[in-house]
Amino acid sequence: MAKQNNVFKDAFNRCVKLLEQTASLPSEPELGAALGVSRTTVRAILTRLEDVGLLAWEKRRKIVLRKPVPADYFPTEETDSLSEIIERSFMRRILAGGAQPGMQINELELAREIGIGTTSVREFLIRFSRFGLIEKRPNSHWVLKGFTSEFALELTEVREMFELRSAAAFAHLPEDHPAWRELDAIEAVHHEILADIEARYPDFSELDERFHLLVHRASKNRFIVDFYDVIAIVFHYHYQWNKTNARARNARALEEHLAYIAALRSRDAAGIETACRQHLKSARETLLQSIN
Amino acid sequence: MAKQNNVFKDAFNRCVKLLEQTASLPSEPELGAALGVSRTTVRAILTRLEDVGLLAWEKRRKIVLRKPVPADYFPTEETDSLSEIIERSFMRRILAGGAQPGMQINELELAREIGIGTTSVREFLIRFSRFGLIEKRPNSHWVLKGFTSEFALELTEVREMFELRSAAAFAHLPEDHPAWRELDAIEAVHHEILADIEARYPDFSELDERFHLLVHRASKNRFIVDFYDVIAIVFHYHYQWNKTNARARNARALEEHLAYIAALRSRDAAGIETACRQHLKSARETLLQSIN
DNA sequence: TTTTTGTCTTTTATCGACAATAGACAGAAT
DNA sequence: ATTCTGTCTATTGTCGATAAAAGACAAAAA
């Protein structure tokens, strides 16, 4: 296996889903644009759709022959990219205990454990190192610095600096900037979730990321926006593996977001700072509680 | 060639330099600690020293036989690590013109041009991407974002936030913290250079990095300290390839540093902020001028 | 004339292999 | 009782090879 064909498999699955709704498929370039892949991959998908009897394909005619069944899809495990697989596997080790700060990280061992080549592990570790959780000793091993309270405090310190500045910049966006419309949409989802909090509180995690990323983007600074990746990954896995009091926590955060959004709309600098500080403070406390 | 032996060559050269001053060498572990390499490499060095007739080596006896001559050293090009070679070669392309923003970066082409394997180029690009100058399109090429004035402004915006905070933290370091002694040493070098500015102004670049890194470290925040890498690399290559008015610029910066250092010593928050802002402002202007 | 398809080339992602380097352990020397 | 050396093993850094995916270009269709 020189390369996984997960791009093909993932796009294939999305294409089968498309088949559930239409009787025929558009041109190859159009389909490629819709699925976000190249024509080479589109043609591989069409070939397979024909092979499994879902589609009659001859040049421009692409006619759906039958409704897709679950067995037509590739299993979801096969559609993940290698780096997603490594990341999950690695974060589980770090966050779900069993990994002490100061521990050595062995590339070969990690590779064998996940069942992949060492090159992929190395590249993952290099990319991952910017999150500040691991550090390289040249010509030697990586050291795990650990998901400690120091880490959380350093992370949130920078986050607060960046977000306060971004929020202030948000207030100066011109009235017709698309961010304002996105803010409306985000606010609406907040109300939806709050209206059915019992059932929908798990949707908060994704919404939280969407909202804060929007705010950070207002800074128009690549370093600030890129730093949001660090925050996002930490909170993502934090929400995933620490569910104590999740409903109450999320409900509170939703309310804080709404106050924060209202402040942004008011464009009042002092009000924005207050609402932003208030929310960041409780986000930090939540994160710290989950560590100790 | 599976791996360069530049660690060996570089340590060998440093060991030969050591030979110029002593008549015998210490034990293997001690020598390893002094050179920062493992015993395996130390033994490879001792073996070669014996082969070229510089040393009589038998167990614990390591007696220098003759004074080293220039021909005993490995050429300096061979002692650089691969990533240093790639970095220089790549930065030259970006900063010394000929590289337009939006340009595609081809891994294979870069590898062939430098005469190395693709894996090393990929790993370099991944590491380098955190500097915000390039960006990856998954399953496709890298895009050069370019050393533009937007880049410089975004960089300096974050730098100013971080350095102001670090400088404020510096004032709160306890009296016996080693940073204060390092600050004394740095200040002394400032006076030395200023006393012979005509000859020594090129030494400023290294001193600048040493000083600002010391300040950033006071933040005790890994993200702030790590970000200094970005600043350091940009200014490093900037100083190297843009020498217009270098003497005057450096003299001015030295004076600003001295004021900044005095302010840190005074521990007066307002004074520190003023001196820091003043210096960062002229650093930003210098950087911007070199771009347009 | 513009878009689509057929065909071909180029580039990326991943693997396994191997030399350089680090590091472990027991016996020898102080 | 430490510290050093001899020897051996484990791990990293780099390479070339190869399948997956992207993308170029001309002929064909609308």
Image (spheres, coloured by chain):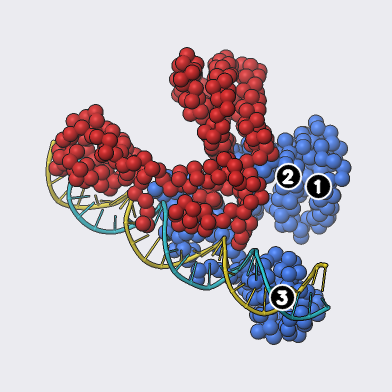
Chain colours: A red, B blue, C cyan, D yellow
Chain at numbered mark 3: B
Q: Earlier in the sequence, mark 1 or mark 2?
A: 1
Identify the disc placed on residue A102.
Answer: none
What is the three-letter code of the residue carrying label 2?
A: Arg
What is the three-letter code of the residue carrying label 3?
A: Val
For the point 17% across and 34% down, which residue is it?
Answer: A66
Circles 1 and 3: CB distance less than 8 Å? no
Q: Position of residue B187 (x, y in %)?
A: 82, 50
Residue A230 lies in quadrant: top right
What is the three-letter code of the residue carrying label 1?
A: Ala
Q: Earlier in the sequence, mark 1 or mark 3?
A: 3
**Quick check: can you spot residue A265?**
yes
Q: Spatial distance from mark 2 to mark 3, Cα to Cα?
A: 34 Å
Residue, disc 3: B16
Residue B120 vertical position relative to residue A207 in the rendered view, above or below: below
Q: Nearer the viewer, residue A100 or B254?
A: A100
Residue, disc 2: B217
**Quick check: can you spot residue B20?**
no
Q: Spatial distance from mark 1 to mark 2, Cα to Cα?
A: 9 Å
Characterize the local packing of mark 2: few (<14), some (14-19) or many (20 or more) Cα atoms within 10 angstroms: many
Circles 1 and 2: CB distance less than 8 Å? yes
For the point 67% across and 43% down, which residue is it?
Answer: B222
Characterize the local packing of mark 3: few (<14), some (14-19) or many (20 or more) Cα atoms within 10 angstroms: many
Identify the disc placed on residue B179.
Answer: 1
Characterize the local packing of mark 1: few (<14), some (14-19) or many (20 or more) Cα atoms within 10 angstroms: some
Are the residues under marks 1 and 3 on the same chain? yes
Report whether A221 appears left or right of A54.
Answer: right
